[in-house]
Image (tube, rainbow, N blue to C red):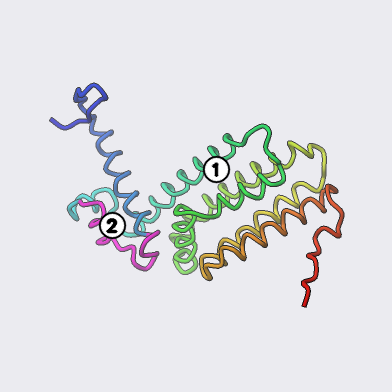
Amino acid sequence: MAGTLTTSGERVRETQAQRRARMRTRLLDAAVESLIEVGYAGTTTLEVQKRAGVPRGTLQHHFPTKADLLAGAVEHLAARRFDQLTKEFEDIPATADRLETAVELTMRMLSGPSFWAALEMWVGARTDPELLAAFLPLEHRLFELMHTSIRDVFRAEFPDDPRVPTITEFTIEIMTGLALRVLLTGEVDRNRIIQQRWRNAVRILLGKAHPDTLTEPRRER
């Protein structure tokens, strides 16, 4: 009898809709895993089928074409990233340094497997109008949510400061560039230095530090 086991060991019969949803999630997880490990070019329907461990007919039943599969993966990936952002935001301690937290939260959202998979979607969407149409609205929603969340972190300390929206935008753009840089160069230490410089710059822009603190001391020759 098909079904799932509860913690007590009892088997509960799944409905057809539940089985379908579980299989769909399995296939989409395989697609995202493929995007992370072999990239957009390597994410074929055959590759996803193998990773999911299902017959070809099962994949075609849920996603008749690669475009259908990738469109589904876009939504699945966006849901993952929405959940990650929400959790990261909720887990901020009340005693946290808000300036430090805003930059760190942005960087965490722009790193890790989910972001790598999204980058592969960016690459594919550049030359695939169908994928772009599915992907772009969700990316806009995600970045709007990220902007709102990061801005609210800043506003916890600077509730009425008109500079906060602009600084939030700059933070997201700079951290996006750093995330791309580290993926290409592997220069993690260099990225940490630039992140710290931006934290110092934010303090200066919000009047929390003197401009001279942005200048690094000269090294002795």
Crowding at dot 1, Cα within 10 Å, few <14 / some 14-19 / many 20+, comes out as many
- Percent x, y for residue 31? 34, 55
Q: Residue furthest front?
A: 221
Specify the principal SS of the magenta part. Answer: helix
Task: Between residue 184 and residue 20, name the one nearer to us.
Answer: 184
Q: Nearer the viewer, mark 1 or mark 2?
A: 1
Q: Is residue 77 magenta?
A: no
| Residue at the image point whose x is 55% and y is 38% from the top | 86
Task: Between residue 211 and residue 55, name the one nearer to us.
Answer: 211
- Is residue 186 shown above or below 67? below
Q: Residue furthest bottom?
A: 221
Q: Which mark is residue 85?
A: 1
- Percent x, y for residue 92? 61, 36
Task: Between residue 210 and residue 148, name the one nearer to us.
Answer: 210
Figure quadrant of residue 176 = bottom right
Q: Amino acid at mark 2?
A: Val
Q: Is residue 46 magenta?
A: yes
Query: Disc 1 on helix, strand or loop?
Result: helix
**Residue of label 2:** 48
Q: Amino acid at mark 1?
A: Leu
| Residue at the image point whose x is 34% and y is 59% from the top | 34
| Residue at the image point whose x is 46% and y is 69% from the top | 127
Number of labels in the image equals 2
* Region rendered in magenta: 35-53
Task: Between residue 151 and residue 212, name the one nearer to us.
Answer: 212
Query: Disc 2 on helix, strand or loop?
Result: helix
Q: Which mark is residue 41?
A: none
Crowding at dot 2, Cα within 10 Å, few <14 / some 14-19 / many 20+, comes out as many
| Residue at the image point whose x is 70% and y is 53% from the top | 169
Q: Check the picture and name the quadrant holding the N terminus.
A: top left
Of the residues under marks 1 and 2, which one precedes in the sequence?
2
